[in-house]
Each structure stands twice: as structure tokens, then as C-alpha cells.
Amino acid sequence: MSATPTPPPKINRLGLAILEYKGSKTTLCAGCGHNVISERIIDALYEMGVPPERLLKLSGIGCSSKTPAYFVGRAHSFNSVHGRMPSVATGAMLANSDMLALGISGDGDTASIGLGQFIHLMRRNLPIIYIIEDNGVYGLTKGQFSATADEGSKLKTGVINDLPALDTCALAIQSGATFVGRSFSGDKRQLLAMLKAAIAHRGTVMLDIISPCVTFNDHEGSTKSYDYMKEHDEPLHELSFVPHFENIDVDYDPGTTMDVTMHDGSHLRLRKLGEDYDPSSRPNAVRALMESHSKGEVLTGVFFVDTKKPSFIDLLNLRSEPLATLPQSAVRPSAKVLEEVMEELR
Ligand SMILES: Cc1ncc(C[n+]2csc(CCOP(=O)(O)OP(=O)(O)O)c2C)c(N)n1
Ligand code: SF4
Ligand SMILES: [Mg+2]
């Protein structure tokens, strides 16, 4: 009897198997939401056919910021200091704007020590996917409340948080980010579609992904636990994504579904689940978020998209070639130009 032949490994449009998108083995706690987000990032990069060497992984400090080690081992990577990833990302993208920048941060890394850098990144519209793996605590330093913890939520020790939470999505929308959404690590479909659309966007994408910390914040009284999210997750719409390299002739009803054409020609489709929602208005997006907070819901979905605003790279009129490969003639002012500058200063 002849043995059944092994099926060939599945490959993406670059001819790469999913193994090429994996990284080191995780050292995070089993069940941590951050591990699930790494898995979805691997799926999204593989399915979109992103060349591993085009990816630039960036992070700050925290359990979340360790995760770039656990996906796409062949990519470029920079683990910066606490809350300072945005300035490193800005420098890197100015030096080579052809990279796909993917920044992984935590709620502590972003909303406490890194808040100033975060806001300025959002207002510049630098092309980057900025992900907050949001568990409401500083997981790495043993579970203190972060600034995204909801007022009234409880630590394992019984301590109640008396301060109001910062909504990083509302902040990003108000500050100028051009693609802003919230998802939950446990919602595989929604998160994957959102990540793929993020890859297709040219500008600042800010995704706040609720990612339960099973060790310090998954108990009763927490508002970032698996149980709480299962009960309070309120999807704004159903997301689907058609990449530019796939057939777009999939029918949709414009009465119930909004189609957003992304920068690379891909399509993000938002099928309404309740009321009409227009993701092109910043005031509406912030209002929807505030209303959902007052109802005690966790609204998820893509709250805001603007595919027209020029990115920071466009504004600076930078060349797309990496700085390191430009000839001297392109990076050094000529003697004549220098002489003119000196003349102005005399
Ligand atoms: C300058 C500085 N201050 C404080 C710390 C201590 N510290 C390390 S990680 C962290 C918070 C991490 O929280 P978060 O970003 O939410 O990541 P998580 O571990 O929850 O994924 C803090 C305060 C540090 N490493 N550096
Ligand atoms: S402490 Fe919390 S955030 Fe850190 S790895 Fe464990 S479960 Fe994840
Ligand atoms: Mg955290």
C-alpha cells in the first residue's frame, strides 16, 4: 500500500509559509491576551503577504512590549525605553519611509509615562500601526492600575480605582490619527479584519485592543477580564476586509454596508448592526465613545477612518529611498547652497 502524500505547505502570495512569520516562543503567562494578539498579527501579516524584511517592529516596556520577539523573527526590531517608542518610530520612518512600522505598546506604556509622546505621534499622522495591548494594569510590575482602568473597577487585593479612565481611542481621534479602532483579543474575526485594514492604511493607525491579564486582572470586579468583555463587548458593525490582490466582485448592499477604499486599493467593509454609523466624522466618533461609556458598554469596531489626510512623510516631501542608500549628492547641500546660507547669516 502506498503512503498518502503529504500535502504541500500553504503559502501566501509571496510564496512564504506561515512559519516565516513566527518568532521566538513566548515567555508570557499562558492565557495572556497579548499572546492571542501576536497570533492575529502573524495571521494578518501572512495573509496580506507583507515581506518579513519590510516590517519594522517597535515597542516600549511592559509584557506587551516584549511581544515583538514572538512574531516575525526575520523583521527589523527595536525595543525602546518606557513610553518612548513614538520618537524612535518617527526617526526610523524618516530614515526609511518604505518600512511597515508596527508599534506595540501597553496601556501603562502609552497612557502614563508615554502620554506626551503618544499624543504628538497621533497629531503627526506618521505611517505606523500603533497597538495598545490594553489590560488596565501594569502587568510587568505586578498589576497596579493603569490610566485606562475604569473608575470603580477592583484589583485582586480589593483596592478600588477612584479615578476616571482615559479613553485612548477618543484621545487619538481628537489628536489627529487617521484610523482608530478598538477590539478584543478574544474576537478573532473582528481583530483580524481590523489588522489587515491597518496594514493597508497609510497614516497613523491606533488600535486599542482589550487584552486580559490572566495573572493580575481577570477576576470579578475587573472591567478588562474575559468574562466582562464577553458580557459588555458592543460591536459597532461587522467588519470584513477584501485585500487589493483578491477579487472585489463580492456583492454588498450599500443600504446596510459601508465600503471604505484603503490606500492600496483594498476594501474595508462595515456592515451595520444597529444604527447608522459614519466613520468619517471625528465629533461623531468621540460622541459614540462617550455615550457607550455612560451606558457601561465597551464599544468595539473602527470608529474613525480618513484615507485622504497627507501623512507626515508626504508633508515633509521626503524621498521614498532609504536615507542610508542616497548618494552624497542628494544628502549634502552643494558648496553654492552653503555659500548662500552663509550669506543670509552675515
Ligand atoms: C522609566 C521607567 N519607569 C518605570 C518602569 C517600570 N515599568 C516597567 S513596565 C511598566 C508598566 C507596564 O505596563 P503596560 O504598558 O500596561 O504593559 P503590560 O505589562 O501591562 O503589558 C512599568 C511602570 C520602567 N521600566 N522604566
Ligand atoms: S503578568 Fe499579565 S500581562 Fe504579563 S504576561 Fe502575565 S498575564 Fe500577560
Ligand atoms: Mg497593561
Image: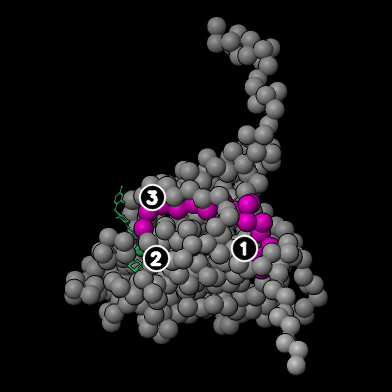
| Alpha carbon separation for disc pair 2 and 3 | 22 Å
In the rendered image, residue 172, in percent from the top left (x then y), is placed at: 48, 57
Task: Give the secondary structure at mark 1.
Answer: helix
Q: Quadrant of ligand 1?
A: bottom left
Please identify the residue farthest to the bottom as the structure is shown: 1
How is the rendered protein coloured?
A: one colour
In magenta, the rendered stretch is 46-62
Task: Say if residue 284 shows up in the picture.
Answer: no
The amino acid marked with disc number 2 is Thr
| Alpha carbon separation for disc pair 3 and 1 | 29 Å
The amino acid marked with disc number 3 is Gly
Please name the residue that numbered disc 2 is placed on.
Answer: 27
The amino acid marked with disc number 1 is Glu
Label 3 C-beta lies within 8 Å of the nearest ligand 1 atom: yes
Mark nearer the viewer, 2 or 3: 2
Task: Give the secondary structure at mark 3.
Answer: loop
In the rendered image, residue 125, in percent from the top left (x then y), is placed at: 56, 49
Q: In terms of sequence position, does the residue under pointer 2 or pointer 3 come before the other?
A: 2
Q: Are marks 1 and 2 in contact (CB under 8 Å)?
A: no
In the figure, 174 relative to 235: above or below?
above
* Left or right: where 203 falls relative to 104: right
Residue count near mark 2 (Cα–Cα under 10 Å), binned few <14, some 14–19, many ≥20: few
Please name the residue that numbered disc 1 is placed on.
Answer: 20
* Left or right: where 316 falls relative to 169: right
Please name the residue that numbered disc 3 is placed on.
Answer: 83
